[in-house]
Image (cartoon, grey):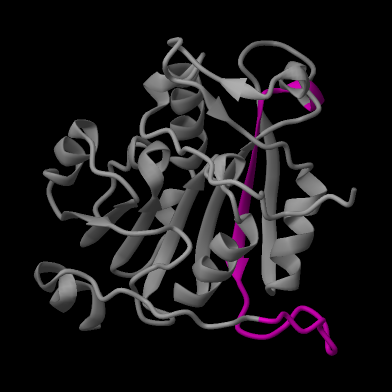
Amino acid sequence: MLWSAKYPKEIALPSSWQQLNNGEQYCNLLTQYFSAWFPKILGYHFLKLGGLSAEIAYDLFLPHQIILSPEITDTLNKLSKQQNTSFIQAKLTELPFLESSIDACLLTNILNFSQDPHQILREVNRVLIDDGYLFLSLFNPISPLLFKRYFHKKPHDRFLFRHYLLWRIIDWLELLNFEILECKPLLQSQKISCFSHLVTIVARKQTYPLTLNPQKICFHKQPLFEPANAFRESILGK
């Protein structure tokens, strides 16, 4: 049976790092790493996809941060009450934004819990401005996590997650004309870096293809939800 990027069944998405084993440690590592890149963001709209991304702290000033998640939770409600922060409930595969309307996007381990990672990346590519930043993290399959199929901290919280080799995600991003700025494993302690649990990618959307004859990507537009009226002016009125 051939491997398919799209999983045949819907996959539950954790809404908080606290639902995962070592989740708080992962969150701290990612916050520390991405904090060095966030000052490079220029623009108005910073999009965080999913509850895991929402919990990555961003202490620098940016006029508008947007948290988008399929579900509403108490934690996300609290985060959305921060200054200059909005919350939108929507599908990750159908982002309710105009093309080229987002300046940067954060995807922390969302692809590991995604039924259709291709579609999420296509949507991110669609809504990002030219030269917009994509900050992405994954669980590293070349680690002890290779033998795990589920993440859980409590018996009733079991999350099926999918393994992706780093080169495969990089290949997908390059086909979408992203420039890879940095790939880095994050160490929990003084261990061999190639076996770290987390790997990160920082990429930038290119105005022009990286090659003269890039491979064409088939993208089928789907009907998009409009943002809530409360956010329309800030999101669409650029």
Q: Is residue 208 magenta?
A: yes
Q: Quadrant of residue 165?
A: top right
Which corner quadrant of the image does residue 94 belong to? bottom left
Query: Looking at the image, can residue 128 be seen?
Result: no
Q: Quadrant of residue 183?
A: top right
With 49 as the anchor, is 179 left or right in this view? Answer: right
- Residue occupying the point 58% across, 69% down: 122
Q: What x and y, as percent, mark residue 154?
A: 43, 10
Residue in the image at 42% along x and 82% along y: 99
110 falls in the magenta region: no
Residue 60 placement (x, y as % from top left) = 28, 47
Which secondary structure is most common in the magenta stretch?
loop
Relative to residue 39, is residue 154 depicted above or below?
above
Give the magenta range: 194-218
* In-image side of 191 versus 202 (left or right): right
| Frontmost residue, 6 versus 143 | 6
Q: Residue at x 36, y 39 (%)?
A: 51
Q: Position of residue 107 (x, y in %)?
A: 50, 49
Residue pictured at 61% horizontal, 16% vertical: 188
Relative image position of residue 21 (x, y in whole percent): 51, 14
Q: Along the horizontal axis of the image, is 121 left or right of 237?
A: right
Determine the residue located farthest toward the right in the rendered image. Answer: 1
Q: Quadrant of the C terminus?
A: bottom left
Q: Is residue 227 left or right of residue 181?
A: left
